[in-house]
């Protein structure tokens, strides 16, 4: 399984903004430069985060982007779902009607369990904890 670039870059953007919280807004250029991201790709991701309400824009000379909430109020699952949609591994996990074997498929039970465990972890973990985990590691808390 490969994590999409949109999610990888989006988490980096949110971490950058979380580290800056609650200071002045960050410009798109500053965010992209600090995270070594292509500005066009960062712009696309910013739009997704804006649409999800996780960040807000501030207009004007000193404008840019700010988190809409404190980092401890933003759950990692919200970032995932803003960037890549609802978390699932295989379509039948969300929509069992697409597969005639769904009710008796042993493998589907594994996919459901994995999604349940991932959702549980990502729902418990906040952006603030993600930022701290990057410095101290996750083993102590997770």
Image: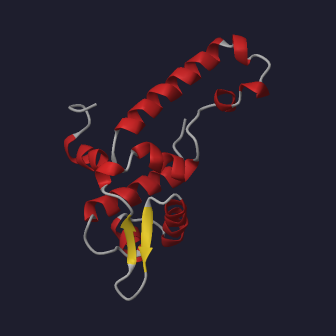
The quadrant the C terminus occupies is top left
Q: Residue 128: where, in percent of width, then height?
A: 28, 49
Q: Residue at coordinates 55% horizontally, 62% vertically from top-left?
A: 51
Q: Residue 123: where, in percent of width, then height?
A: 41, 37
Q: Residue at coordinates 26% horizontally, 36% vertically from top-left?
A: 138
Question: Can you see residue 5?
Answer: no
Q: Residue at coordinates 34% horizontally, 40% vertically from top-left?
A: 125
- Name the side, left or right, on which 92 lies relative to 36: right
> Residue 106 lies in what quarter of the image?
top right
- Name the side, left or right, on which 50 lies relative to 125: right
**54 to 128, vertically: above or below:** below
**81 to 36, vertically: above or below:** above
**43 to 89, vertically: above or below:** below
**35 to 102, vertically: above or below:** below
> Residue 139 lies in what quarter of the image?
top left
Q: Residue 47: where, in percent of width, then height?
A: 54, 66
Q: Nearer the viewer, residue 140 or 66?
A: 66
Question: Can you see residue 114?
Answer: yes
Q: Nearer the viewer, residue 122 or 134?
A: 122
- Name the side, left or right, on which 92 lies relative to 109: right
- Name the side, left or right, on which 109 lies relative to 24: right
Q: Nearer the viewer, residue 40 or 49?
A: 49
């Amino acid at each position: 399984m490969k994590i999409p670039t949109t999610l990888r870059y989006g988490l980096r953007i949110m971490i950058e903004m979380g580290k800056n919280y609650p200071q002045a807004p960050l410009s798109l250029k500053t965010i992209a430069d600090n995270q070594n991201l292509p500005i066009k790709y960062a712009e696309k991701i910013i739009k997704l985060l804006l649409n999800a309400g996780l960040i807000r824009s501030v207009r004007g000379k000193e404008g840019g982007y700010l988190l809409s909430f404190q980092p401890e109020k933003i759950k990692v699952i919200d970032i995932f779902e803003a960037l890549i949609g609802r978390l699932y591994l295989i379509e039948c996990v969300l929509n069992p009607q697409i597969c005639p074997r769904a009710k008796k498929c042993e493998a589907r039970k594994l996919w459901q369990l994995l999604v349940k465990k991932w959702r549980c972890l990502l729902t418990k973990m906040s952006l603030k904890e993600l930022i701290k985990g990057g410095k101290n590691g996750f083993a102590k808390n997770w």
